Image: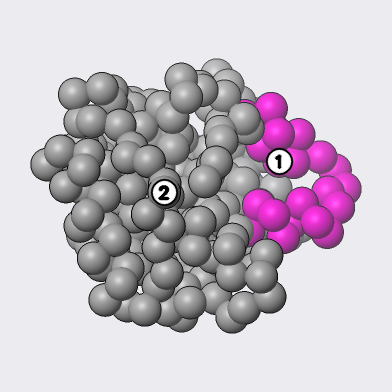
Amino acid sequence: MTPAQRQAASEALLREHGIPINPQLPWIEDEHEVRLRSADELCRRLAALWGVVGTAMLRENDFFEDYFSIGDRRSWLSNDEARFLFDDEPVEEDYIRFSWRLEALYFLAWCGGLVEQIGLPRSEASAREFLHFFPEDEADPVALAAAVRVRPVGEILDWSDRLYRLHWAVRDAHLNGRPTPGGIEPGVVFEWHYAVNWMTRYDGEDDWDEIGTDT
């Protein structure tokens, strides 16, 4: 699929669900221009997100701090993630912010084939479908590494294009004081867009904390 065809397909889908489009938004990259993250990179990022989401949701539980203290696992975390996970007294804002990373975890789990299919982001996600791939003790994430199979670049770019245009739609609604169109959940759109931009190496950025989501 060419970038123009991908844009047309995304716009048709959004129109079908009553979601406004901005025809002035440019195409995203061509499939031949994108080098996706490797399975190893994706596995480490999934583990990092599992750690911070678990810490945010299971307060007072030091399992994840202990887990990422072993070997070189701390290097899997971004600087911001490590600060949160190893902070003795995280602020409430960080608990909330990192609990939202469940959505990025969910989307990247789809990118790695751990989730069979996803639809328009109208509700918050659950990790139940793939949580069994993660360790229950301090062992390495062997089952996760064995299960991750990076989806074809075309499938991921289809979602990259949709999320780019969805992000514009929810932001435009917010700026103009209108309800979010199509029952879309803005927080989920942001996290999925953030995740797909990391997956496709958007703007050449490798630092998870610095991923951009321009629209």
Would you say the magenta stretch is mainly helix, strand or loop? helix
Q: Which mark is residue 113?
A: none
Q: Residue at x 40, y 63 (%)?
A: 21
- Can residue 8 be seen by looking at this rendering? yes
Residue 64 screen position, x and y as percent: 62, 44
Q: Residue at x 80, y 56 (%)?
A: 93
Tell me the kind of residue under disc 1. Answer: Leu
Q: Nearer the viewer, residue 27 or 147?
A: 27
Q: CA distance from mark 1 to mark 2?
A: 41 Å
Q: From the viewer's perspective, is 107 left or right of 50?
A: left
Q: Which residue is mark 1?
A: 85
Q: Nearer the viewer, residue 25 or 127?
A: 25
Give the residues drawn in magenta, as a range.
Answer: 78-99
Q: Which residue is mark 2?
A: 24
Give the mark nearest the N terminus, 1 or 2.
Answer: 2
Residue 87 screen position, x and y as percent: 81, 40
Which residue in the rendered view is the most extreme toward the front? 24
- Can residue 39 be seen by looking at this rendering? no
Q: From the viewer's perspective, is 79 left or right of 151?
A: right
Q: Nearer the viewer, residue 147 or 166?
A: 166
Q: Is residue 178 magenta?
A: no
